[in-house]
Amino acid sequence: MTTSHRIVVALDLSEFAEIVLEHALDQAARHTAPDLHFVTVAESEVDADVEAVRERLAALVLPALDTIGRTDWKAKLHVLAGEPAEAITNFAAEIRAHLLVIGRFGTHQPRERIGASASKVIDLATCSTLVIGLSGDAVDAQQCLACAEMRTATDGRTWFCAAHTAPDRMRLSSLVETVNSL
């Protein structure tokens, strides 16, 4: 008897939740008949209208599942209460999830808390965890023009210019070429 691949998809219902959903569905497509659990965490059980939160979750998830058109996938929606990282990881552990997918955007959090929930999830999770961030440069730093030219000229075989390469350092590109030539 084979077990379905259980995937927990944590969605915060922000404008970036679709990105997390897209990555989760990509992971699900790699398995036969996955068992998907879409979760969101209400601020508090007393203050939150759980049914309204569930409707928002359904409005996000169901159209995406409809476009896939797979009838062998199982999908369930869950509204959890409590501290987000603990609620999500406890739920994933309870259902013995194989993968947990969560976003790390932090656009609505103070600068010092960006990604705090995702970091806690990584620490607490008992299963593999895929953390989704925005693509592009995460660090606002100047790139060395000579390094960029070197990457382009060598089609990515050499990444750094002479000024940023230690002459006595072993290079991965030379190791790969050696291995490939065997």
Image (tube, grey):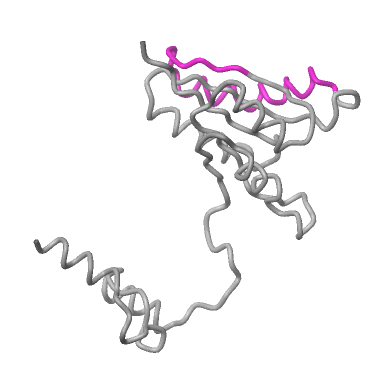
**x then y, percent, for residue 2:** 37, 15
Q: Is residue 101 above or below residue 29?
A: below
On the rendered structure, is 108 left or right of 145? right
Q: Quadrant of the C terminus?
A: bottom left
On the rendered structure, is 102 left or right of 14? left
Splitting the image into 4 quarters, where does residue 9 fall? top right
Splitting the image into 4 quarters, where does residue 63 fall? top right
**x then y, percent, for residue 12:** 70, 36
Splitting the image into 4 quarters, where does residue 72 fall? top left
Q: Which residues are magenta?
A: 49-76
In the image, what residue occupies the spot 38% across and 25% down?
A: 31
Which residue in the rendered view is the most extreme toward the right? 47
In the image, what residue occupies the spot 77% across and 49% down?
A: 108
On the rendered structure, is 90 left or right of 151? right
Which residue in the rendered view is the most extreme toward the left? 182
**x then y, percent, for residue 27:** 44, 33
In the image, what residue occupies the spot 15% across and 61% down?
A: 180
On the rendered structure, is 111 left or right of 149? right
Q: Main secondary structure of the magenta part?
A: helix
Is 148 one of the magenta-colored residues? no
In the image, what residue occupies the spot 76% across and 59% down?
A: 112
Q: Quadrant of the N terminus?
A: top left
**x then y, percent, for residue 100:** 55, 34
